[in-house]
Amino acid sequence: MPVLNERDYLEHAVRSVLQQDISGPTELVLALGPSTDGTTELARRLAAEDDRVRVVDNPQAHIPVGLNAAIRASRYPVVIRVDAHSELAPGYARKALRTLERTGAANVGGVMRADGRTPFQRAVARLYNSPVGLGGGAYHGGAREGEAESAYLGVMRREVLDEVGMFDESIRRGEDWELNLRIRQAGHLVWFDPELSVTYWPRESWWRLARQFRATGAWRGELVRRYGRRNSLRYFAPPALVVLTALAVITGVLQLTGVLRGAAAVVATIVYLPLAAYLLLVLAVGLGGVGIARVPRGVGERLWTLAVMPTMHVAWGLGFLTGVLRGAGDTVDASRLGDRNTPLP
């Protein structure tokens, strides 16, 4: 479990891990980044209270670096990746181990069930769980078990991780997708099992969400630079939205200034049609609950849904275009820094 500034979530996450009913020895290795909110002291207290919990330092605070440090420090043949901002469902580990054995897969993952405690966080969670929000990845709500492109978090055979070289430490976001690509290229199976679920708590503010999605988009653009069309077509939808928006703004300026006139101006209005369709989709999702599992509750949640959906897409799309054109460089997800996370009720 990589950990950075998770004081308000860490204890719940650790408890959900330690309560897993596995027959045989287990351990939880926390890769501890340089937190500033009391997480370090909390993590060391949890380790002192339960000898199954161990701590390794991750001074760079990068997720793949911390994951590799924790894996190298681990002692058992199966590695279960967990997140400090999530909680494992009861029986998750036991079911995953059975699926790993039954399928012969190298990596098994389940469903990311996003949830929220505030109107904003619930709006984000509903879009995480929806194909109109984050797209068509199986772990965002798939129902059919089978071979998968990637796995959320993942329950992995240590011998396969050693074989493929573990996580690529030069990748700051999307490291799981890249690892699973190498696992599949090595001839191993990545498997999705909808019976496995993990509760994920999204970012707690609009600014944190925008920063997270911009960084994630930039690294997806970097992965497109490195791996081209091995990336799914769904990753290209948000940058297409950004490009269309830019074209619409330019067209509007040219029409208002008279540069585009007559028939040319009429033909140019075609660029507004997909944006109008997108606006109608946002309204249908936010006000009517189209494309999401449950209609948003209350005025606050509906308004946040209207704001969150384009924020996710535009921030991700802007990051993607930057990543494709210039590379991700030193882009990091800074959404865990600054003021603290929303406390538990």
Image (cartoon, rainbow, N blue to C red):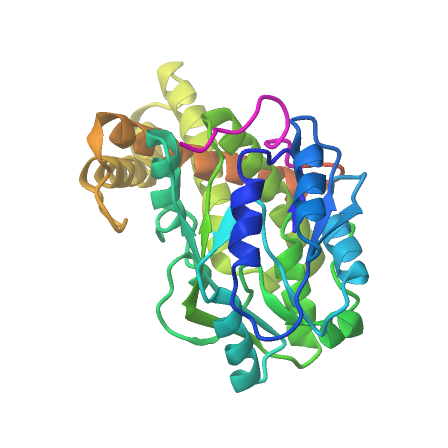
Residue positioned 59% across, 79% down in the render: 105
Instruction: Say above or below: 281 vs 299.
Output: below
Closest to the observer, 46 or 123: 46
Q: Is residue 249 magenta?
A: no
Closest to the observer, 22 or 163: 22
Q: x and y percent of residue 208 in the render?
A: 53, 29
Closest to the observer, 345 or 309: 345
Magenta stretch: helix, strand or loop mostly: loop
| Quadrant of res 306 | top left
Closest to the observer, 316 or 104: 104
Pick out the residue farthest to the left. Answer: 288
Residue positioned 71% across, 78% down in the render: 186
| Total numbered labels placed on residues in the image | 0
Residue 146: in sight, yes or no?
yes
Q: x and y percent of residue 197 in the render?
A: 43, 61
Q: x and y percent of residue 156 in the render?
A: 64, 70
Q: Is residue 52 left or right of residue 17?
A: right
Q: x and y percent of residue 213 in the render?
A: 54, 38
Residue 148: in sight, yes or no?
no
Pick out the residue farthest to the front. Answer: 49
Q: Is residue 333 left or right of residue 76?
A: left
Q: Is residue 5 left or right of residue 209?
A: right
Instruction: Say above or below: 159 vs 342.
Output: below
The residue segment tinted magenta is 333-345
Residue positioned 50% across, 33% down in the render: 209
| Quadrant in the picture for the C terminus | top left
